[in-house]
C-alpha cells in the first residue's frame, strides 16, 4: 500500500494543535507527526487525515455521525480504540483541536508505556542455570 503525504495545510493545522496541547509530546509515528502522552500515541497525522485514540463513547459518536471510520492501517485489520477522521473534519481547525484535545485527555488516563530498553528488560526474566555441569573430559597420559 502506497502512503501519501498530508497536505501542507493539514500539516500546518496539526502544528497549531501541537502548540496548544503542550501536555502532549510531539514525535513521529508511521513517518507522520503525532502527539504522545506518557508514551502512548493520542493523535497523529495519517495520509490526508488524522487518527485519534478515543474512549468507546466518543468513538461511537464520531462513527455514528459519519465523521470518522475505524482506523485500518492495513486493509481488513482495524486497530482497536482508534478512529480515522474524515478529511473534512481533519481540515477544520476548530474540530481538529477539539477532537485532538479529547484524544489527549483520554490517552492521559491510560497506563504509561515503558521506554524501549526498559520494556525489553522487563520482558526478559533471568535464565536459570542448571546445577549440573557436564563432566570434565578425561585426558590420557601418553605411553612412552
Image (spheres, rainbow, N blue to C red):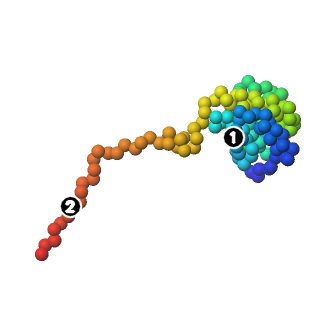
CA gap between label 1 and label 2 equals 60 Å
- Kindly report which numbered mark, 1 or 2, lies closer to the viewer in this rendering: 2
Quadrant position of residue 136: bottom left
Give me the disc on residue 108: none
Sequence-wise, the earlier of marks 1 and 2 is: 1
**Which sits in the foreground, 120 or 47?**
120
Q: Measured from the top left, where is residue 48 in percent x and y?
A: 82, 44
Q: Residue at x 27, y 47 (%)?
A: 132
Quick one: SS at disc 2? loop
- Taking the image as drawn, is residue 79 in sight? no
Residue 9, can we see it? yes
Measured from the top left, where is residue 77 in percent x and y? 69, 40
Comparing 55 with 109, the one in front is 109
Residue found at x 42% / y 42%: 126
- Label 1 packing within 10 angstroms: few (<14), some (14-19), many (20+): few
User: Does residue 132 sit above or below 40 in this rendering?
Assistant: below
Q: Most extreme residue toward the left, as rendered? A: 144
Quarter where residue 44 is shown: top right
The one of 6 and 21 positioned closer to us in this rendering: 21
Query: At which x and y percent is residue 56?
Result: 71, 26
Which residue lies at the image location 74% right of the left edge and 51% below the top edge?
Answer: 1
Q: Is residue 48 left or right of residue 75?
A: right
| Tag 2 residue | 138
Instruction: Tell me the crowding category of disc 2: few under 14, some 14 to 19, or many 20 or more residues within 10 angstroms, Cα based.
Output: few
Say what secondary structure mark 1 lies in: loop
The residue indicated by pointer 1 is: 77
Amino acid at each position: 500500500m502506497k502512503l501519501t503525504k498530508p497536505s501542507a495545510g493539514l500539516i500546518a493545522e496539526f502544528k497549531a494543535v501541537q502548540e496548544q496541547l503542550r501536555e502532549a509530546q510531539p514525535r513521529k509515528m508511521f513517518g507522520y507527526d503525532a502527539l504522545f502522552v506518557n508514551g502512548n500515541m493520542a493523535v497523529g497525522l495519517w495520509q490526508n487525515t488524522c487518527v485519534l485514540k478515543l474512549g468507546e463513547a466518543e468513538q461511537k459518536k464520531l462513527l455514528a455521525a459519519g465523521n470518522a471510520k475505524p482506523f485500518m492501517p492495513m486493509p481488513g485489520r482495524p486497530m482497536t480504540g482508534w478512529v480515522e477522521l474524515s478529511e473534512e473534519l481533519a481540515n477544520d481547525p476548530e474540530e481538529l483541536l477539539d477532537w485532538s484535545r479529547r484524544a489527549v485527555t483520554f490517552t492521559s488516563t491510560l497506563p504509561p508505556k515503558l521506554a524501549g530498553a526498559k520494556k525489553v528488560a522487563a520482558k526478559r526474566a533471568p535464565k536459570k542455570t542448571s546445577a549440573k555441569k557436564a563432566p570434565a573430559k578425561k585426558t590420557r597420559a601418553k605411553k612412552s
